Each structure stands twice: as C-alpha cells, then as structure tokens.
Amino acid sequence: MPDPVPLPTAILFDLDDTLLDTTLSATRVWDQTAAAFAHEIGHPPSVFQPVLKASRAWFWGDAKRNQAGRLDVQASRIAVTHHGLLQLGIDDRGLAARFADHYSAHRVSTMAFFAGAEQTLKFFVDAGVPLALITNGDARGQREKVEHFDLARYFQAVLIEGELGFGKPDPRVYAQALSACGVPAVGAWCVGDSLSWEVAAPQALGLRGVWNDWAGVGLPEDTDVRPDQTVRCVADLVPLSK
Ligand SMILES: [Mg+2]
C-alpha cells in the first residue's frame, strides 16, 4: 500500500474509461447489435463480432479518423459498420446506417459507472474538494452521458470538447477547469486513462497526473510518460487520500 498523499486542492476527472466503463460497455452493445442484425447480414454474431472488433481497431487506430470520429460519433459508427460489412462482401451503407442507429439507441443505457466511481465523487465533494469534468468527444454524445448519469451536480465545471471547440491536451482545457475550481495547478490532480491527455499534459502544467489503468495492462514499453500515481479504478483514490 503506497503512503497516503495529502488531499488534493481539486481534481480534474476524465469521463470515458475513468468514471464510466466506456470500452467494456461498447463491446457489449456492438455484440448485441450484431446479434440483432444477424439475420439481415446473413452471418451469425460469432462471425460479425470479431470483424467489427477489427473494424473498430482499424477506424480508431488512425489519428486523423480518431479526431474526426470522436466529434461525429454517429458517422464513425456508420463507417466502422460499413467497413466491417465490406469485409463480408456486403456494400450497403443503408444497412450500416440502420445498424449504427440501433447501436446508438442502446449505447448510453448500457454504460455503467466503474465500481465505486460515484461513491468516490461523493467522497471528494463531501471532503470539500472541488471537481471538474474534462471530456473529449462530441457535444451531443458526451452531454447525453452527463445527463443520463446526473453528473453535473458533482462538478464545478463540465468541459466537453465538442462544446468548447477545443479539447485535451490543449492547455486551455486544464486552465479553464482549474479556474472553475478556484485553484492553481500545483496541488491539483488530473485523473484519467489517457497517458497523454490526463497524465503528461497536466503534469507539464504542474498538476499531479494519476493514470487510471482500468484494463490492468501496465505502462506501455514505448512510453516516456511517468504517472505520479497509477490506480486500477478511481475508487482506489479514496484510501490514498487522508
Ligand atoms: Mg478516457
């Protein structure tokens, strides 16, 4: 058990794969949608699910597609599906669009807080620590999550890339969040699963960078980023703070 560290002056929380089980729940919805469309596609879910998985990796693995895709998630879902269908010899954009619509309709309702995440927010709020939510992604999709999980009540500011017109790792995001919390960078924490967005960039500004290694994969060998703290879930932050 690491030594307890002093309570932070503020915490900037990431949303996806930090408070919410975004990646795990996405797989559930893709798999359910593949099952729902199996008859129309003409292939069982056991065939289309791995194709879709590879298609998602193809789509999001490209930096340019990644940036454009997260600001227009519906277009990204259609592109992922269409690319997957093409692998099966099916060139049908209409089918891809209906598939993506079905996925989108079930997306947020299948997401969940990681175990203990909401209690962690309550712990810090009760301890008088101001919190800010900083999340990259499109305005509509990210706002829908904030509303579905009634998150705004915990935060001094909810900063969404698609609403601001800029996102992490732009220093203005962290500055705006710190300003809403009324604190300087030193003494504040940033917590998230992205080593560049929630560890390296905020560290460069003087914040403590806490990496949420939710998948338990450990630091990649090819990274120079060194988190000040690594946790498996945000609930691990509570016993660390005394
Ligand atoms: Mg994240």
Image: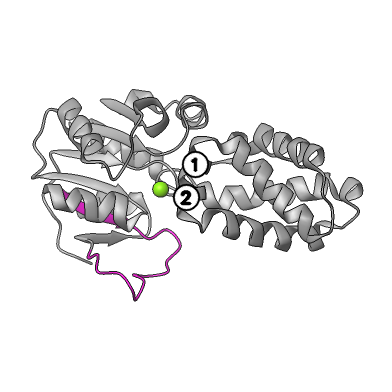
- Amino acid type, residue under disc 1 in the picture: Ala
**Coordinates of residue 70 in the picture (x, y in percent):** 49, 41
Q: Are marks 1 and 2 in contact (CB under 8 Å)?
A: yes
What residue would you read off at disc 2? 64
Residue 111's quadrant in the figure? Answer: top right
Colour style of the rendered protein structure: one colour
Q: Callout 2: helix, strand or loop?
A: helix
Is the stretch drawn in magenta largely helix, strand or loop? loop
Mark 2 burial class by Cα count in 10 Å: few <14, some 14-19, many 20+: few
Please give the name of the residue rendered at 44% of the width and 49% of the height, measured from the top-left corner: 17
Please give the range of residues in magenta. 207-226
Residue 212's quadrant in the figure? Answer: bottom left
Mark 1 burial class by Cα count in 10 Å: few <14, some 14-19, many 20+: some
Residue at mark 1 to residue at mark 2: CA–CA distance: 6 Å
**Coordinates of residue 169 in the picture (x, y in percent):** 28, 45
**Coordinates of residue 222 in the picture (x, y in percent):** 33, 74
Check the image and report above or below for 200 versus 2.
above
What residue would you read off at disc 1? 68
Left or right placement of residue 94 versus residue 207 in this view: right
